[in-house]
Amino acid sequence: MQLDSIGGVMLDFTRKGGEMDGAGSDYQSVHSAGFSRRRFLAKTSCFGAFYAVAKLIPLPTLAAELASDSRVSQTPLMDKGFASVRKVGSGLYATISDPSKGMTTICNGGFLAGKDSALLIEGFTTPAGALFQMDALRMVSQVPVKGALDTHYHFDHSMGNSFYGANGVQLWAHATAAKRIMDSYVPLQGVDKEAALGPFEKRVKEAKSDVERQHAQSDLNAVTGVYQAANATVLGLPNRPIDPAKLPMSIDLGGLMAVLESYPGHSGTDMIVRVPNQNVVYTGDLLFSGWYPVCFDEKATISGWRDTLKKFAAFDQDTLFVPGHGQICGQEGVASLREVFDDIAGQAEKMYKAGVPAEEAQHRYAVPDKFKNFPIFAWGFTIGPAITKLYAEWQAK
Ligand SMILES: [Zn+2]
């Protein structure tokens, strides 16, 4: 079992830390207005530890310049606390999660509704999350759903997929996403908790310093959450694999043209949805808005991701980005994530040149004041692997 390569991210916020033992249940039960009447039951054990810390980091409100953007509606179409849906263009909607208020969705998403059909974005963390978004779509449009897209395979974007399966919605994703879901999450199902989490507990016990212990604890919390989520989930696999070699692909929804593209960086399965006519882009996790980037994936590439962000920066200056996590942003959101990468790379390079070994360097990064409010998913899923991957890139040169 490849426990090192468990897909997924969990809220940790080590710097705000300390409240890791909270047990608040937070699965929001959702009653559907239309698509399905099914009620999703609370799972008290799942995500309890994460929710306790996520509560400390509320989602920032929409920036003033975006609130006054004519594309963006002032009031959300739907708001359940854990996520809200807002109009961001003609036929375009963004689903923005606020994990401080619940873990039903965790990631952002959205949908596009044309005259003939609609495209949903993300499977979210639970079927209730996918249902929430479907309900929002049905408030504004009754057109048939052409498909739902997982922007990549990670659990917080895919573990609600079974909702689509149960409702006959075709599920789109990068051609390798189904295999990555299987390889990452099936091995966790039905496995003894000790066997799954033991190696991470061991790292906490054997940590050489308080800092390393804190980092190891954050990783243990993250993996515990993924383990619990995997065991609480009936996995749903994409049934429309999209070959990245055949991208970009235009999708005509009827008076609304979307383009699927694939870029390297976050997971090796990353796809974005662009609406060129309106300068709106759904980036998946290639963009974290006001967050440290999650870089743990075995297919994540730091240089590739930085190149991708450079390309996003070259999109129209008026572009509205719906990021994978965090608030809707404009080009300033891309610029700040680029700065975060520059900062990590800058600090790492100094250590590399000074001969600090990678195992040590990955723990030594200091969060600058500028980014002190940027949430950090577990250390070993964000900054740690960013540094070890940078080291590996430099060593390969
Ligand atoms: Zn992700």
Image: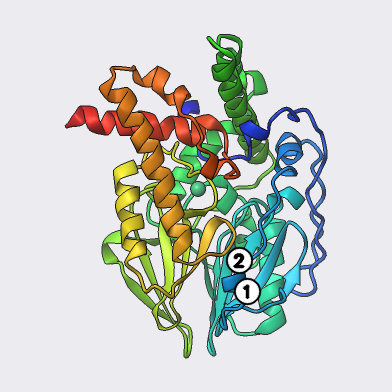
Query: Does the rendering let one see residue 199?
Result: no
- Left or right? Give the position of 234 relative to 24: left
Q: How many numbered marks have been drawn onto this rendered protein structure? A: 2
- The residue located at (47%, 27%) in the rendering is 4
Amino acid at circle 1: Ala
- The residue located at (36%, 28%) in the rendering is 388
Relative depth, front residue between 341 and 132:
341
Quadrant of the rendered image containing residue 196 = top right
Q: Is residue 173 above or below residue 359?
A: below
Task: Locate the C terminus by quadrant.
Answer: top left
- The residue located at (35%, 37%) in the rendering is 345
Amino acid at circle 2: Ala
Q: Residues within 10 Å of mark 2 (few under 14, many from 20)?
A: few
Whether residues under marks 2 and 1 lie with C-beta atoms below 8 angstroms apart, the answer is yes
Residue 67 pos. (x, y %): 62, 74
Q: Residues within 10 Å of mark 1 (few under 14, many from 20)?
A: some
Quadrant of the rendered image containing residue 84 = bottom right
CA distance for labels 2 and 1: 6 Å
Relative depth, front residue between 185 and 257:
257
Residue 101 pos. (x, y %): 76, 52
Does the Cβ of the disc 2 residue fall within 8 Å of ligand 1?
A: no
Which residue is under mark 1? 67
Relative depth, front residue between 15 and 91:
15
Q: Secondary structure at mark 1?
A: helix
Task: Kindly identify which numbered label has been placed on residue 295.
Answer: none
Which residue is under mark 2? 63
- The residue located at (69%, 30%) in the rendering is 17
Relative depth, front residue between 299 and 354:
354
